[in-house]
Image (spheres, rainbow, N blue to C red):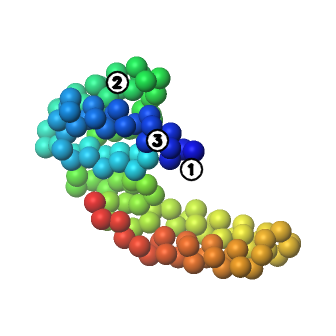
């Protein structure tokens, strides 16, 4: 919960900067992850430079993985690829295996394992549309 509050608090100014100063209309943001859409790659490069400067003033930095890509490229955003499929199935599988181990040694209840399984199943089956 703390990270959600901090994301809203610190990145609200960034949202206004993107909308009012950079005039980007196509924006998707979830906590500290965001996508910007524009028809000009050159303008997006400019926006990236301006965002870097803006965030440095706030003592924040963009992730090293930040990049500009074509809308036809596949990408991962909040754990899903651009087609809405969950992109980290192996991670889910590994976590479930760990939960089963914890259950087998008595450190986790069966209800917790079942609830996790249902949650992960729904996560993997739900589509996220961009």
Which badge, 1 or 3, comes first in the chain's sequence?
Answer: 1
Q: CA distance from mark 1 to mark 3?
A: 10 Å
Q: Does residue 35 appear left or right of residue 6 in this picture? A: left
Q: Quadrant of the C terminus?
A: bottom left
Instruction: Count residues near mark 1 (Cα–Cα under 10 Å), then give few for <14, some for 14-19, many for 20+.
Output: few
Residue 45 visible at all: no
Q: Residue at point 14% right, 38% down?
A: 40
Q: Secondary structure at mark 2?
A: helix
Q: Residue at point 40% right, 36% down?
A: 11
Q: Does residue 51 appear left or right of residue 105 in this picture? A: left
In the rendered image, which quarter is residue 102 located in? bottom right
Evaluate if marks 2 and 3 touch, with contact meaning CB atoms under 8 Å apart: no
Give the residue furthest to the right.
105
Evaluate if marks 1 and 2 touch, with contact meaning CB atoms under 8 Å apart: no
Residue that mark 2 sits on? 54
Q: Residue at point 21% right, 47% down?
A: 26
Which label number is shown at residue 7? Answer: 3
Q: Secondary structure at mark 3?
A: helix
Q: Secondary structure at mark 1?
A: loop
């Amino acid at each position: 919960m703390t990270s959600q509050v901090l994301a809203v608090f610190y990145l609200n100014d960034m949202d206004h900067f993107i909308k009012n100063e950079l005039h980007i209309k196509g924006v998707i943001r979830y906590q500290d992850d965001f996508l910007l859409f524009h028809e000009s790659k050159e303008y997006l490069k400019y926006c990236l430079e301006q965002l870097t400067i803006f965030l440095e003033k706030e003592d924040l930095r963009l992730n090293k993985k930040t990049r500009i890509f074509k809308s036809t490229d596949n990408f991962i955003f909040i754990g899903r690829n651009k087609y809405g499929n969950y992109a980290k199935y192996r991670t889910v599988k590994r976590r479930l295996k760990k939960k089963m181990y914890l259950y087998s040694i008595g450190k986790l209840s069966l209800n917790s394992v079942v609830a996790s399984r249902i949650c992960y199943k729904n996560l993997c089956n739900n589509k996220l549309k961009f």
